[in-house]
Amino acid sequence: MCGISGIVDSEPIGTRLFTSIRNLEYRGYDSCGIATLHEGQINARKNTGGVDEVNSTEQLDQLPGTIGIAHTRWATHGGVTQENAHPHLSMRNEFAIAHNGIIANYQRLREQLIQQGFEFRSLTDSEVISNLLENAFYEEQDLEQALQSTLKKLEGTFGLVMISLHDPERIYAAKQESPLMVGLGEGTNYVGSDINAFLEHTRRAWVLEDGEYAVLDRERVIIRKFPSGKMVQKQVLQIEWDLETTKKGGYSHYMIKEIFDEPQTIRQVLKVPDEQIQKLAETLTGATQTYLIGVGTTFYVAQLGQYFFSILASRFFPVVSSDEFRAVGQVQPGNTVLAVSQSGETYDTKHALAMAKERGAQTAGIVNVMGSTIARMVDQVIMQGSGPEICVVSTKAALAQALILLRMALLAGGKNIPEKRRNALNQSLLDFPDLIQQVLNEKSGFVRNLANATSHVDHWLYLGCGAYYPVAMESALKMKEVTYCHAEGMPAGFLKHGTLSMVEPRVHSLLFVPPPEDAVLHGRTMVAMEEIRTRGGTVMGFYFEGDEVARPLLNHSVKLPPTDPVLAPVLQMIVAQLFAYYVALDLNRNIDKPRNLAKSVTVG
Ligand code: F6R
């Protein structure tokens, strides 16, 4: 959460700094600001609102100077106000900092500084950092020493960038648990929370580890450890992401653009070598106990993986939400924990993995973002290769993760799956990109009409059986995130155990109907449908061609072309993404940046 960046150059950097936080805006968007050094003073402009909105009043991109830092905020400590927006200047305006993370001991530090005569302008935890730096500089008369002694005092998490009048040619940056990367340019250098801060300018990066700080000038970057000050040599991370995928490319929102990227996303998944997936499959099946973890969408993706492993490999792997893993995960040596994470920076997932490591378990990840903490901390990683996902809600990345888990389960099942069955599923996987393209082309107009017809509905029940259950859960989450409507997902068979009392004509239910050949699941879904219909509930359904049982019972429906029964729930997940998007569009929601949310949740 929160995006930070910094640029040092010999040319003016106002526009580039502004663009960098615009590109990081999915990390937080309640307020933002920029500080640059120019003609012996720090100029800072900041305000509440999204990046473009703030720029229209504050002209952030017009700030003069060839060195500066920037921040886009997702508030934790202190409300959304101009004073609480970053960057924060020190009391004498000699230092400016932008911070991502939480300073746990900020209250004590703040009181100490106040006793020493410092005054504060904001209610944030972050402002102590600028004043600590100023205070330390007056004691030590050396900027790097002042940074080191400040870092020593901080408890908690930080990705931090700083500029100072006392060293007008350099940016200082430090990392403890919150992500930070240096972008290596020619006669210019960059720092940012993630690759998107500088992808337009350089594809060469150094990833900072916890306990490291960087000093950047135009020509070089030096990385040291704190507190020892020992210099660190880094391997260059070559970024392969396609810049075009970070652009909206004519679509009105990233969400719909990223949904339409999905055929290509699947092709990328199919390029991940079998050997890599097989190796991880062996780790999972060879462990004395395997847990799958994720949180939010990735929790539901992991649940979908659980069904794939059960169906295709006859293996049961418990799935635990990363944030609860500490409470219930009884991890031991010999166990494996596989984490699913788009950003590779999610606090809860990182900490669950850290616990697993501490207790001697093997760790693994399916991760999208290159160089991210989770990608680097696990023993085995599969990079899903979905490219940048800019919309705050996950669509294409979740799809890729689901399909990697499917491929893994298929390889884990191996020869125990009859050859004919294996070949058929493999062929359907190969055909899947084209099938999805066809569904997107042919059904999106129809789904849009359906969304327009139902966008007044405030309460939804999303129901599915078997692998359609996690799809129902994930689809309900998508609906809530982008439309702000209430959507409750549950197993279809669960409905009669309580929630059925809610059913009435105004409450709509969306049923994820399996193809009729999946007879048991289809039958159970029909039972739930009847339970709702007989109580006057309105029923919408996603069903497959040839299903003459479901079709006449549905008030609204989307008919889908046939695919393999194992892929059928995945296809419906995509249609539910489209549906959520079009409802949100009709309701005029802030689709790419829904209220109160941020991508990459790096706080606990
Ligand atoms: C929902 C969504 C979130 C993330 C969750 C985990 O659309 O995107 O629920 O899935 O915050 O994030 P990652 O995958 O980055 O670990």
Image (cartoon, rainbow, N blue to C red):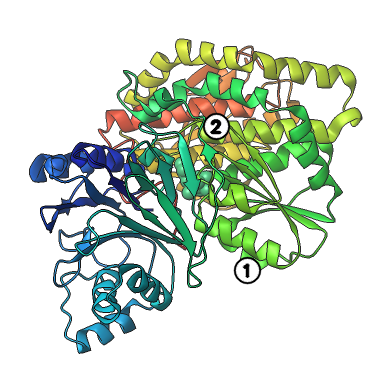
Where does residue 485 sit, x and y in percent of width and height? 36, 42
Q: Is residue 28 visible?
A: yes
Measured as percent of width and height from the top left, residue 147 is found at 35, 69
In space, the residues marked 1 and 2 are separated at their CA atoms by 33 Å
Residue 247 or residue 596, whichever sits in front: 247
Secondary structure under badge 1? helix
Is residue 488 in view?
no
Classify residue 436 as left or right of residue 272.
Answer: left
* Above-or-below relation of 442 to 487: above
Q: Relative to the observer, which residue lies in front, 9 or 391?
A: 9
- State the image coordinates of residue 301 (x, y, percent, origin top left): 60, 41
**Most extreme residue toward the bottom, as rendered?**
115
Most foreground residue, 525 or 443:
443
Select label 1 or label 2 by which is in front.
1
The image shows residue 126 at horizontal and vertical percentages of: 29, 67
Residue at (65%, 30%) from the top-left corner?
403
Is 523 placed above or below 371 here?
A: above
* Residue 327 image label: 1
**In the rendered image, the vertical position of residue 333 relative to residue 307, given as above or below:** below
Type of residue at label 1?
Ala
Q: Residues within 10 Å of mark 2 (few under 14, many from 20)?
A: many
Above or below, 135 relative to 346: below
Find out whether the residues at labels 1 and 2 contact each other: C-beta distance under 8 Å.
Answer: no
User: What residue type is disc 2 on?
Assistant: Leu
Q: Secondary structure beneath disc 2?
A: strand
- Please give the residue where the numbered disc 2 appears in the rendered image: 511
Quadrant of the rendered image containing residue 591: top left
